[in-house]
Image (cartoon, helix red, strand yellow):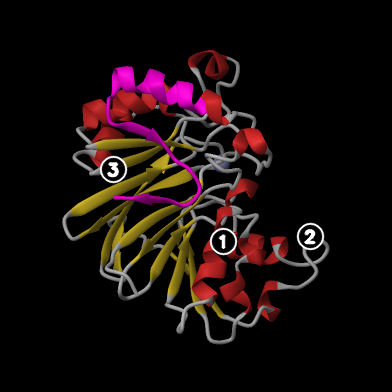
Amino acid sequence: MENEPIFTIHGARGTMAISGRAFNRYGGETTCFSLATRQGILIVDAGTGIIALGDQLINRRRIPPITIMFTHFHLDHVIGLPLFKPLHRQDASVTIMADPHREENWPDCLRKFVAPPFWPLALRRFGAAIRFQPLPRRNHRMQKYGVEIAWYPLRHPQQCLAYRFRIRNRSIVVATDHELDADCAGSAFTDFCRGADVLIADAQYTSAEYAAHRGWGHGTFSACARLAASSGVDKLILTHHDCCRRDSQIDRLVHRARRLFHATRAAHSGMRVD
Ligand SMILES: [Zn+2]
Ligand SMILES: [Zn+2]
């Protein structure tokens, strides 16, 4: 194994996966991130980006302990789950975690989603040891695989969690699916992000698009850039790209965001975050 920890973005597309030449550079895979340490691998969300990650993991001599932490359960964040190959391996152990305060019984929702008639095989027949475990209710933080993890509920339909990971004095915040522009409790979230090395944030819309999509649960690149500046992070990575946004258009959004916060890039499939 390489020197760890390694944080990777496996999918940066929002709402729906897409393919085609116009989307090749940033990739068409939907949301998935991973943080690999010597003790295991933490995965955030199971969009279609998780498929390529699963292929990498089953090619290792030993599959590491795996924990998938969901931000929420909209389709673009769960659709890759049945194609995550470690779930089909008897030597794999996978813990699935999410917010205990969610309204729905989320383990049941996942079991129903990965089952006929939506999928030919039920999740319980996949082979791996799969354990559902709510995040701890108190303090909104825990330790796993040597990583300190904290979370924060975001403004989004059916709610979404942001995660903050800290290991070896480096912090990365993942805040996908967030209507930041309408977030009145902004200062508490600014504190959650404060001083992180990297902020990965939902920048699905331009300001004009946002005006036509208020209440849909996503934000603008300009709100992300302002948050990055006010919370004192080192780097900003824009993610949850609109599924119809072509590579050349994402380039232009990054260019515009850099006028507000210079250290801005756009997430792409396979991006190593350092
Ligand atoms: Zn989404
Ligand atoms: Zn969502």
> Which quadrant of the structure image shows residue 244?
top right
List the residue tagged with mark 3: 198
Q: Amino acid at mark 2?
A: Phe
Q: Confirm whether residue 132 shows in the render.
A: no
Indicate if the residue with disc 3 has its beta carbon within 8 Å of ligand 1.
no
> Which quadrant of the structure image shows residue 105?
bottom right
The answer to whether residue 241 is above or below residue 36 is above
Q: Amino acid at mark 1?
A: Ala
List the residue tagged with mark 1: 52
Where does the magenta region start and end?
250-274
270 magenta-colored: yes
Tag nearer the camera, 2 or 1: 1
- Residue 42 relative to residue 83: left or right: left
Q: Residue at x 55, y 21 (%)?
A: 214
Q: Earlier in the sequence, mark 2 or mark 1?
A: 1
Badge number at residue 118: 2
110 magenta-colored: no
Q: Confirm whether residue 190 shows in the render.
A: yes
Q: Secondary structure at mark 2?
A: loop
The residue lying furthest to the front in this view is 21
The residue lying furthest to the left in this view is 169
Crowd class of label 3 (few under 14; some 14 to 19; many from 20; radius 10 Å) = many
Where residue 162 sits in the image (x, y, percent)? Answer: 39, 46
